[in-house]
Image (cartoon, helix red, strand yellow):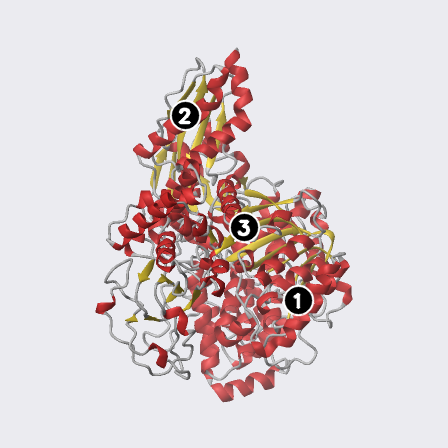
């Protein structure tokens, strides 16, 4: 008889991804405790995961037999599963069929599923299509996170508008949430009411009046003790009497609403598609509550958020980091964990759950209350300067302890130990005003106890990101001093003498702090602003190199491509996740760089595709020698890194170094108006070039411009940068070079900060030099160089900095022969005539830099699929055309034959027929007389390392045959990718194919 897993395998489910909820020996059950309690039968039969996140909840059709209204049962199941907050689906497994429903906070009972049949060709791809973000059923437009945040904002804002402080608003709403959870979880029931609040008519009315509030809050303190969201006083009779006198009976309204008694303040006010009463707290994820509360705290004080750089961490990112950090961690379930900037406790909650899961795995039994409380009280520590945040962290940890508790009864025995001062540590500076949150040394200060040094198996968290303002320079000096001391402890005495915290950033010092807090050989995992990876300034490169010398970094997830998406909502700047072992690197140590692409189907669900196939191993010492290496491998490949090095070697100097006074050359950004304080009379009468000039894409036609009228400028710049001949490079870089990226002017001209000007007025060969620069600025090679090396272009903006142009390797024209000069002149004239021959121009520039056909091919492919422009991003993720796939097949056969044919083997490459809706397209490669398959082997899914890989390799067990599946996106089907694939096939499978072909 076929098992459930066998039947799910018909639809592409891998047994390793399946969590069977009726089994009692799988530690992953702790991820779904809300689905397995409250009865003998779990709410669903199986959960299929992807990257440890729920992807598909599955119920067997047998569960529906005998139900009078199975449609209503399925609708209610969809609603409850949607309360878990993950972008997952519901599947009903029938005989030979799988029905897919969207989970929905407000489902329609008669919704029809999308059905897939086991005997049809598209069955095996169902799970893979879901993993890639495809909506196989119409998803709900209601997002739990948005609903919850809106409700919490309304409740807290209503209290604040009455005149309550942020602290009181947080404490009261938090206590109401805690009480609501106790009700939803079934920890308190109606028979407890007389002990909780004799004045209340029901549990839901325990916050409904002055007497009820007094009694209920006293009961909460007595029963749970600990740090349960302290109010200004414990004399609740006096406190609530005062509040009701000052604020009136309306005080109870938002608190009653949280307990499920939703009543609008006025007709039409605060009416949402869902109210508090619609939420099922038995399934609401604690991590999401923490994340939402943390964002709410930030919204209440936006200025503090900016100055102290508070950015809440999405729960799914915290869970991913915790999962990665604990992978094969030698300390296992005994690990001690520190979050040095814990906020509302998102990382502490995720670590708590993971430690409980590891306890289950190591002991073979689910942790009971004593084990859970030991983890909470002895293995977790969180630092924070914000008392409000620590209160919320305590609340989240208490709720997690109750959620994981297999039998939270009787309620009188659930008392918690106090967390403040032992688990949650106030690290505010000694002289800090507790009522004012401002930047301070905090966790990095000398006042933090030495007992926390070398004390943790894992240091994990999301430290502050924003640079300090000049007023806080003393804090920056403290950061530098602390970093230097830690460098000295690691034997890096040159860094002890020279290290300086770059650009007054607040996150990098925490990397150094983590080295001090973690045990030798312990793990470090930090979410950081991503800019430090790409900084090209001497200070930025020096600071990055110092960290790579001091710490054995093992992996970096670069989130630059998924910024401004739901992966990390409300964060515009690039971010990265750093993973490391706490030791000084050894010779040959490498780390892995992973840069997920923005895939709308996933990112709109708050997820990203993390693919080991796309991971790039990098030697740590190379990062300390090549400033642009990480940027190059983010936007390109190892082939691009080699080209960048050759360009460096070809040119003896950079454009900025060449374009100087000694050569009669000047450069600079155009004038800035602002305060109009400085003399600008030297520009009088010059034609004035506006930022939106479009008369000609490549040359300034001065007869159409108005003369400059002096009026004062804040930054007029040097008069010499406005003298012709000059080239004006647009700051705003245009995606289509036909629209012009730089302008030649043969007349003196006034131009603003929208242009970077390069004047050759005092050079003996100035006009040719200006034309040469115009050609360079319009070449693929210059765009490619900026994409590979710029700290900003291709990271967080589509514009250039003067540094990007200055750093371009410049082959001096003095070494050109007559033929080369003639080619440059011809290309420049074509631009001025508005008839550019781009192929000739690119070939001319490539020849100057000694680049051959394969180099130009790589450059073209990289620009066509990796540039930051919206049209390029859309093209790169678009499906592969049949023509493109055939070109790829033919080129792959050519590349493989160039090596294997020398041994006498004939290579055959063929596209395979398959379901066009699969995320991959497949090709088969064989040698000699082997017969190529006509269709995709039915066992292909078993060879996928996971459901999110970009490449699947199926090696035939007997024949000289392999089948390759490549993600059906143009970025994976370029000529350059063909060469890389051929190289990988030859390296990994070439010898095996040849051996089998001999038989």
The correct choice, above or below, for 171 with respect to 812 in the image is below
As measured in the structure, the alpha-carbon distance from the residue carrying label 3 to the one carrying label 2 is 32 Å
Residue situated in front as seen by the camera: 306 or 276: 306
Disc number at residue 492? none
Which of marks 1 and 3 precedes in the sequence?
A: 1
As measured in the structure, the alpha-carbon distance from the residue carrying label 2 to the one carrying label 1 is 59 Å
Judging by the rendered image, the residue that carries numbered circle 1 is 383
Camera-side mark, 3 or 1: 3
Residue situated in front as seen by the camera: 310 or 704: 704
Please tell me in which quadrant of the rendered image residue 194 appears: bottom right
Camera-side mark, 2 or 1: 2
Which of marks 1 and 2 precedes in the sequence?
A: 1
| Secondary element type, mark 3 | helix
Judging by the rendered image, the residue that carries numbered circle 2 is 894
Q: Is residue 92 at all visible to an observer of this figure?
A: no
Side of 270 relative to 503 (left or right): left
Disc number at residue 630? 3
Q: Which residue is painted at 37% across and 80% down in the image?
A: 680
Residue 211 percent across, percent down from the top left: 55, 80
Residue 49 percent across, percent down from the top left: 51, 43
């Amino acid at each position: 008889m076929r098992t459930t897993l066998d039947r799910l395998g018909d639809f592409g489910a891998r047994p390793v991804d399946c969590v069977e909820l009726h089994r009692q020996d799988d530690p992953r059950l702790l991820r779904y405790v809300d689905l397995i309690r409250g009865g003998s039968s779990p709410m669903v039969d199986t959960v299929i995961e992807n990257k440890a996140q729920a992807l598909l909840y599955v119920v067997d059709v047998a569960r529906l037999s005998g139900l009078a209204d199975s449609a209503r049962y399925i609708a209610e199941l969809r609603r409850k599963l949607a309360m878990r907050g993950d972008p997952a689906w519901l599947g009903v497994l029938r005989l030979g069929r799988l029905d897919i429903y969207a989970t929905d906070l407000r489902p329609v009972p008669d919704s029809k599923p999308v059905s897939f049949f086991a005997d049809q060709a598209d069955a095996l791809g169902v799970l893979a299509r879901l993993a890639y973000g495809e909506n196989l059923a119409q998803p709900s437009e209601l997002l739990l996170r948005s609903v919850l945040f809106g409700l919490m904002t309304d409740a807290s804002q209503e209290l604040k508008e009455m005149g309550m402080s942020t602290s009181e608003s947080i404490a009261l709403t938090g206590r109401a949430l805690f009480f609501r959870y106790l009700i939803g979880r079934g920890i308190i029931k109606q028979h407890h009411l007389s002990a909780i609040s004799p004045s209340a008519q029901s549990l839901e009315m325990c916050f409904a009046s002055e007497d009820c509030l007094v009694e209920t809050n006293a009961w909460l303190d007595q029963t749970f003790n600990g740090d349960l969201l302290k109010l200004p006083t414990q004399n609740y009779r006096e406190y609530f009497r005062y509040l009701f006198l000052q604020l009136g009976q309306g005080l109870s309204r938002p608190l009653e609403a949280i307990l499920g008694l939703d009543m609008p303040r006025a007709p039409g006010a605060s009416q949402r598609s869902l109210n508090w009463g619609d939420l099922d707290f038995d399934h609401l994820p604690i991590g999401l509550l923490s994340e939402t509360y943390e964002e709410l705290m930030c919204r209440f004080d936006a200025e503090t958020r900016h100055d102290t750089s508070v950015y809440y961490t999405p729960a799914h990112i915290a869970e991913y980091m915790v999962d990665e950090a604990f992978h094969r961690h030698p300390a296992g379930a005994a690990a001690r964990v520190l979050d040095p900037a814990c906020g509302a406790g998102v990382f502490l909650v995720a670590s708590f759950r993971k430690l409980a899961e590891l306890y289950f795995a190591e002991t073979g039994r689910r942790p009971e209350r004593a084990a859970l409380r030991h983890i909470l009280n002895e293995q977790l520590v969180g630092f924070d300067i914000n008392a409000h945040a620590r209160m919320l962290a305590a609340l989240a940890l208490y709720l997690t302890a109750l959620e994981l508790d297999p039998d939270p009864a009787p309620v009188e025995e659930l008392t918690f130990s106090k967390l403040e001062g032992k688990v949650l540590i106030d690290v505010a500076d000694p002289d800090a005003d507790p009522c004012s949150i401002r930047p301070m040394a905090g966790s990095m200060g000398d006042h933090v106890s030495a007992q926390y040094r070398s004390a943790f198996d894992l240091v994990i968290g999301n430290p502050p990101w924003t640079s300090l303002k000049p007023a806080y320079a003393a804090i920056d000096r403290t950061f530098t001093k602390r970093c230097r001391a830690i460098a000295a402890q690691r034997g890096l005495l040159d860094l002890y003498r020279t290290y300086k915290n770059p650009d007054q950033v607040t996150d990098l010092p925490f990397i150094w702090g983590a080295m001090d807090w973690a045990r030798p050989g312990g793990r470090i995992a930090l979410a950081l602003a991503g800019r430090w990876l790409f900084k090209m300034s001497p200070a930025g490169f020096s600071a990055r190199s110092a960290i790579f010398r001091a710490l054995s970094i093992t992996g970096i997830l670069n989130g630059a491509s998924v910024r401004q998406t739901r992966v990390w909502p409300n964060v515009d700047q690039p971010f990265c996740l750093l993973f490391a072992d706490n030791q000084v690197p050894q010779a040959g140590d490498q780390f892995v760089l992973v840069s997920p692409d923005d895939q709308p189907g996933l990112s709109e669900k708050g997820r990203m595709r993390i693919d080991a196939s796309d991971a790039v191993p990098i030697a740590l010492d190379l990062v300390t020698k090549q400033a642009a290496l990480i940027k190059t491998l983010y936007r390109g490949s190892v082939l691009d890194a080699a080209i960048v090095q050759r360009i460096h070697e070809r040119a003896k100097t950079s454009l900025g170094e060449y374009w100087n006074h000694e050569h009669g050359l000047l450069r600079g950004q155009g004038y800035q108006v602002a305060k109009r304080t400085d003399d600008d009379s030297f520009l009088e009468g010059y034609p004035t070039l506006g930022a939106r000039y479009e008369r000609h894409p490549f040359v300034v036609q001065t007869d159409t411009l108005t003369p400059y009228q002096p009026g004062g400028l804040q930054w007029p710049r040097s008069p010499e940068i406005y003298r012709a001949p000059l080239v004006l490079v647009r700051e705003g870089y245009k995606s289509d070079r036909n629209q012009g990226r730089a302008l030649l002017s043969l007349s003196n001209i006034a131009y603003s900060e929208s242009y970077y000007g390069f004047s050759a007025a005092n050079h003996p060969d100035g006009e040719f030099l200006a034309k040469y620069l115009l050609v360079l600025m319009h070449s693929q090679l210059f765009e490619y160089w900026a994409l590979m090396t710029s700290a900003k272009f291709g990271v967080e903006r589509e514009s250039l900095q003067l540094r990007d142009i200055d750093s371009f390797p410049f082959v001096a024209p003095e070494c050109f022969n007559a033929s080369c000069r003639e080619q440059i002149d011809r290309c420049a004239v074509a631009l001025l005539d508005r008839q550019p021959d781009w192929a000739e121009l690119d070939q001319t520039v490539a020849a100057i830099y000694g680049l051959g056909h394969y180099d130009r091919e790589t450059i073209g492919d990289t620009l066509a699929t990796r540039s930051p422009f919206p049209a390029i991003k859309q093209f790169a993720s678009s499906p592969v055309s049949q023509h493109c796939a055939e070109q790829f097949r033919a080129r792959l056969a050519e590349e493989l034959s160039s090596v294997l044919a020398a041994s006498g083997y004939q290579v055959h490459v063929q596209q395979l027929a398959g379901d066009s809706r699969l995320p991959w397209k497949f090709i088969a490669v064989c040698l000699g007389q082997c017969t190529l398959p006509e269709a995709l082997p039915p066992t292909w899914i078993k060879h996928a390392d996971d459901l999110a890989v970009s490449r699947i390799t199926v090696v035939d067990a007997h024949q000289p045959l392999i089948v390759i599946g490549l993600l059906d996106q143009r970025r994976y089907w370029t000529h350059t990718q063909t060469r890389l694939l051929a190289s990988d096939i030859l390296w990994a499978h070439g010898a095996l194919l040849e051996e089998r072909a001999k038989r």
